[in-house]
Image: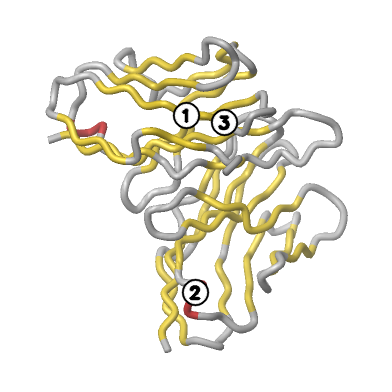
Amino acid sequence: DTGVSQDPRHKITKRGQNVTFRCDPISEHNRLYWYRQTLGQGPEFLTYFQNEAQLEKSRLLSDRFSAERPKGSFSTLEIQRTEQGDSAMYLCASSLVRAPSSYEQYFGPGTRLTVT
Amino acid sequence: AQSVTQLDSQVPVFEEAPVELRCNYSSSVSVYLFWYVQYPNQGLQLLLKYLSGSTLVESINGFEAEFNKSQTSFHLRKPSVHISDTAEYFCAVTTGWGKLQFGAGTQVVVTP
């Protein structure tokens, strides 16, 4: 399988705990995106990387959230001191910036976080 | 900034009947438009996209969408749905290689 993978698929944690999610993009893709999707809503952009550089962060990404892509390959998203409002599906996507462009983003299966 | 409005949160439809999912967007610059489909407990899959050229775009599984610049719309249609088309459908826009801006989604429920 050469698609985008995410780990874990499900995470249940208690309020106040820290959690970390991992995303492995399609191997040659140089852009990696994180989105959050709550029930009944479309995905909302959190942040994206070009190689290892974090190029944009949403206002949704509070100080408790941090994302890294240290070697320009996989990425991690950490949430510190989780709150019940953090319960959501966290989606990762990747794309290859090239010409001609298709602007298509390929999504992983997501990590569903439940904060109790 | 861009925004996307999907006018219907849920669309019930009988098998083999046609379906139309409405999507309107607003943007002060040119955008590229996408429809994604999400099956239960899965990630999003690209259904079709409009980048330029012909305003009518088609997917391999019978869906089509028409870009209407004057009405800022990108409605999705299928002339005859199958049970397997039951899913949530998201319209999205981007100005380029940055973030996608999604609508709230339309749940399509196909019944026999």
Q: Which image quadrant is residue A9 in?
A: top left
Q: Are marks 1 and 3 in contact (CB under 8 Å)?
A: yes
Chain under disc 1: A
Q: Tell me the amino acid under the disc marked 1.
A: Cys
Residue type, numbered disc 2: Ser
Residue B84 circle label: 2
Binning the other alpha carbons within 10 Å of mark 3 as few (below 14), some (14 to 19) or many (20 upward) gives: many
Task: Locate residue A62, reporting x and y percent.
Answer: 34, 18
Residue holding disc 3: A25
Q: Which residue is found at the position 57% from the left and 44% from the top?
A: A1
Chain identity of mark 2: B
Mark 3 — on which chain does it sit? Answer: A
Q: Residue at x 25, y 16 (%)?
A: A80
Q: Is residue B18 above or below residue B98?
A: below
Q: Could you tell whether A104 is left or right of A57 in the image?
A: right
Q: Residues within 10 Å of mark 1 (few under 14, many from 20)?
A: many
